[in-house]
Image (cartoon, rainbow, N blue to C red):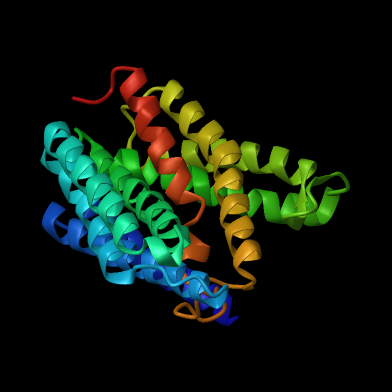
Amino acid sequence: MTRIITASILAALFIYAILSAPITVFTVMIEIAAAICFLEYARMALNKGIPVLKVRGLVAALLIPLAFISSHYVAYMVLVFILAAFLFTALEVAEKGLDPVVYTLFGTIYVGLAFSAPLLIRMEENGAQQFLLICSATWGADIGAYYIGRTFGKTKLAPAISPGKTVEGLAGGVVSAIALAGLCNLLFFPQSGIGLVLGAGIIGGIVGPVGDLAESQIKRSFGVKDSGSILPGHGGLLDRADALMLTTPVYYIFLALTGRVS
């Protein structure tokens, strides 16, 4: 019951933020989420005995989304600056080895690029509806994969990483992702074509589980069950955002490749 209540509250707040919050408020919310996810990542690394450079990594991860919504030129300059800063840091901590720098840089890029996509999508024409579309597809995939997998799942998808995931669940997730994206389209975005619904559904159904499995592998390598405990019944925010952290960047690339971004 705690899990359901938490999910319902989160979904309501998230939909409000997507459809009604001004872009400045939405940006602040995305940056807060990015900060929480990076700090959860740093905590997991510390559990493995890897002292992630928390302050430098956090600042860099938060700068990347802001740079992208400024301009692509600013984004490139910020990324080069971050790379140079970490190269100098590698020289500074040379006697300790490169592990802290490598793990920090990975976390920075993982979180920074992932949380840039919601802002980039939100700033496009009909961006709120576009973002809600990929969120619906991602959530639909998760729901469908869970129930179809529990009912009909027999063939393990990635037993070494996540024993509960099945091929049958993946297929069911794709179908439910397209269905929920179609419902979202009818309710909030009726002028969009079937191509967007199918694109969002396929990305949510296939790419979403990859994001989930990738975060599961990160947790496994760090020796933790959950990324945190901020969400009752769900673990950490990174545990809940992992699929969206991959589906939204891929969806933005899909929009760009199909000429739907300015």
Q: In what quadrant of the picture does the N terminus appear? A: bottom right
Relative side of 144 to 128, left or right: right
Q: Residue 103's spot in the image, x, y percent?
A: 45, 58
Quadrant in which residue 194 is drawn: top left
Relative side of 207 to 36, left or right: right
Relative side of 209 to 31, left or right: right
The residue that appears at 68% across and 49% down in the rendered structure is 145
Q: Residue 104's spot in the image, x, y percent?
A: 39, 60
Residue ranking furthest to the right: 154
Relative side of 120 to 138, left or right: left
The residue that appears at 31% across and 56% down in the rendered structure is 91
The residue that appears at 27% across and 70% down in the rendered structure is 55
The residue that appears at 47% across and 34% down in the rendered structure is 200
Q: Nearer the viewer, residue 59 or 101?
A: 101
Q: Nearer the viewer, residue 102 or 60?
A: 102
In the displayed structure, would residue 50 be above or below residue 207? below
In the displayed structure, would residue 114 be above or below residue 222? above
Residue 256 appears in the picture as rendered: yes
In the displayed structure, would residue 103 be above or below residue 83? below
